[in-house]
Image: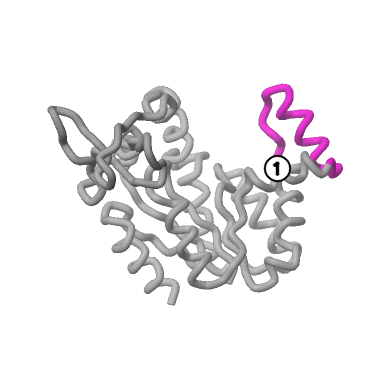
Amino acid sequence: MNILIFGPNGSGKGTQGAIVQKKFGVAHIETGVIFRENISKGTDLGKKAKGYIDKGELVPDDITVPMILNRLKENDCKGGWLLDGFPRNLAQAQALYEALQKEGIKLDYVIEIVLDRQTSKNRIMGRRLCAKDNNHPNNIYIDAIKPAEKNGGFVCRVCGGELSARADDQDEAAIGKRHDIYYDTKTGTTAGINYFKKRAVVIGVDGLPGVKEVSEELLKKLG
């Protein structure tokens, strides 16, 4: 089973991707990891990518797509894969799909975790880190994991520890830029998702409920 997964920041895409990976025993492929591995190993593609990254430029698709294809051909992907983090726009969606077709690699499913822009923003800005354990989930905008109230403020819902917010989670301008790309229906990520709707089985899942409810709906649709 070969899968692409999409969802805006704050939609729980990473969590759901991990659940799908575990359930179906497929390789969970993250594009960021692919870049780091190619650069650290000094592959030809990695050297080319590093040249762009060092200059603060985006790595061209004609480097990124072959890098991804090479990863999808590795042994651990023979039983299926779930690709997370690519494509991010319409042009990349077209390039990836055409490359998969050329290599005879079938794309079985495209997962889209649907979440409106404002809720996505709230969830990002509502994330809080526990001083005692970063694995304790706390979010002031999600009822199921809302921090406990104490002395007019919030403390960790699990252990009562102090909470803090990551600086980048509070950067509204940066969040807005990422969402501008994701929700763009002409050339952005959403345009790419719409492109796949004519070429693969796209499974849309409402991202509003809790993790358990979303995963139950997703796994049911994947069968």
Residue 170 drawn at (x, y percent): 37, 26
Numbered disc 1: secondary structure: helix
The residue positioned 16% from the left and 36% from the top of the image is 149
Which one is in front, 123 or 192?
123
The residue positioned 67% from the left and 23% from the top of the image is 56
Which one is in front, 85 or 15?
15
The residue positioned 29% from the left and 37% from the top of the image is 161
Does the magenta portion include 98?
no
Does the magenta portion include 44?
yes
Task: Give the side of residue 207 with respect to residue 101, left or right.
Answer: left
**Measured along the vertical axis of the image, is residue 134 above or below residue 73?**
above
Residue 120 drawn at (x, y percent): 34, 40
Residue 40 drawn at (x, y percent): 78, 40
Residue at image mark 1: 35
Residue 160 drawn at (x, y percent): 25, 40
The residue positioned 46% from the left and 33% from the top of the image is 178
Disc 1: CA contacts within 10 A as few (<14), some (14-19) or many (>=20):
some
- Residue 76 position by quadrant: bottom right
- First to last magenta residue range: 42-60
The C terminus: image quadrant: bottom left
Task: Give the side of residue 55 with respect to residue 161, left or right.
Answer: right
- Residue 213 position by quadrant: bottom left
- Residue 57 position by quadrant: top right
**Measured along the vertical axis of the image, is residue 90 above or below residue 26?**
above
Task: Give the side of residue 62 with respect to residue 22, left or right.
Answer: right
Task: Give the side of residue 63 with respect to residue 172, left or right.
Answer: right
